[in-house]
């Protein structure tokens, strides 16, 4: 069982959070894979904690693919806090501090960024200003930049705040744009075959290691995941704290 963890969820009222992440966090909570769990949700929506918990409850009931009894769902929601993004880094830091005081010594931090590329750096800087970088991991969901130049710049600025081993990236658009991206990056056009990325993981990892090292700067290819067609975004893995990140595939 992994250490107790506070998960800071950015973009918590968005479509991805409602459809995938909130149901996934409920499952993580109920699976007992962690000693304990707290969720500090945040978004730019002007809502309070009660309104967010109602939103989360409705989303989980609509999109959860597993059986979830009302008592279990209510118990999970007691572990969820909400901070409006406009409240600033100080308010976020206080909410995380409160959660960690409840979890006790040795609690871990996992920051999950379910935000568009243009908002990613604002979130990174908020985490820096809230003093929440230490002993944490950061998951960057959705496209990593909008093109090669923006990805290189985002990567450079990201490394000013987080070490590479703290970062885990998930880019759905590698799959959506695979023929064009493959040609332009020099990757074989069939490296993401119809059978999914799992069977091409070894080839992909060895190829993208050279590609990103030369174009994107220092990047560990252990810290990327490319979901296959119809693939669900992964539930935050408690093993991230022990192993850095899961493999690409």
Image (tube, helix red, strand yellow):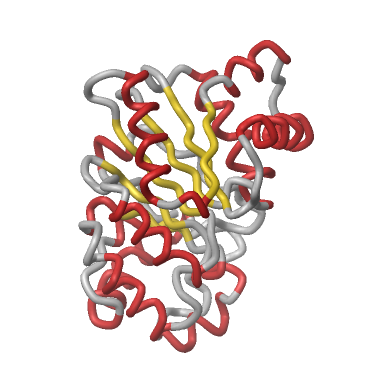
Image height of 203 relative to 100, above or below = below
The one of 193 and 221 positioned closer to us in this rendering: 221
16 displayed left or right of 109: right
The quadrant of the image that shows the N terminus is top left
Residue at image coords 44%, 64% = 120
Look at 65% across and 17% down and name the residue there. 74
Would you say 156 lies left or right of 139 here?
left
Res. 18 image quadrant = top right
Which residue is found at the position 51% from the left and 44% from the top? 234
Q: Which of 69 and 200 is in front in this view?
A: 69
Percent position of residue 4, x then y: 34, 23
Which percent across, then down, holds residue 39? Answer: 48, 32
Quarter of the figure that contains the C terminus: bottom left
The image shows residue 151 at horizontal and vertical percentages of: 39, 77
Relative to residue 51, is residue 38 drawn left or right?
left
Q: Please say if 51 is above or below 70.
A: below
Residue extending farthest top: 71
Instruction: Note whether 14 is above or below 154 in the view shown.
Output: above
Location of residue 132 (image quadrant): top left
């Amino acid at each position: 069982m992994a250490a107790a963890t506070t998960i800071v969820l950015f973009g918590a009222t968005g479509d991805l959070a409602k459809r995938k992440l909130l149901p996934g966090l409920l499952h993580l909570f109920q699976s007992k894979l962690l000693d304990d769990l707290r969720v500090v949700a945040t978004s730019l929506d002007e809502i309070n904690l009660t309104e967010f918990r109602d939103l989360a409850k409705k989303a989980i009931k609509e999109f959860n693919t597993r059986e979830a009894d009302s008592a279990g769902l209510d118990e999970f929601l007691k572990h969820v806090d909400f901070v409006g993004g406009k409240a600033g880094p100080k308010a976020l830091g206080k909410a995380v501090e409160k959660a960690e005081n409840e979890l006790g010594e040795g609690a871990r931090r996992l920051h999950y960024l379910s935000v568009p590329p243009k908002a990613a750096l604002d979130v990174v800087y908020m985490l820096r200003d809230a003093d929440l970088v230490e002993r944490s991991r950061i998951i960057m969901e959705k496209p990593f930049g909008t093109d090669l130049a923006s990805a290189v710049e985002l990567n450079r600025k990201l490394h000013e705040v987080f070490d590479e081993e703290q970062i885990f990236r998930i880019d759905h658009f590698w799959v959506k744009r695979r023929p064009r991206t493959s040609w332009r990056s020099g990757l074989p056009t069939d490296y993401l075959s119809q059978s999914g990325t799992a069977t091409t993981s070894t080839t992909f990892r060895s190829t993208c290691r050279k590609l990103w090292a030369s174009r994107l700067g220092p990047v560990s290819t252990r810290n990327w995941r490319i979901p296959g067609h119809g693939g669900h975004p992964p539930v935050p893995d408690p093993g991230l704290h022990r192993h850095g990140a899961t493999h690409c595939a």
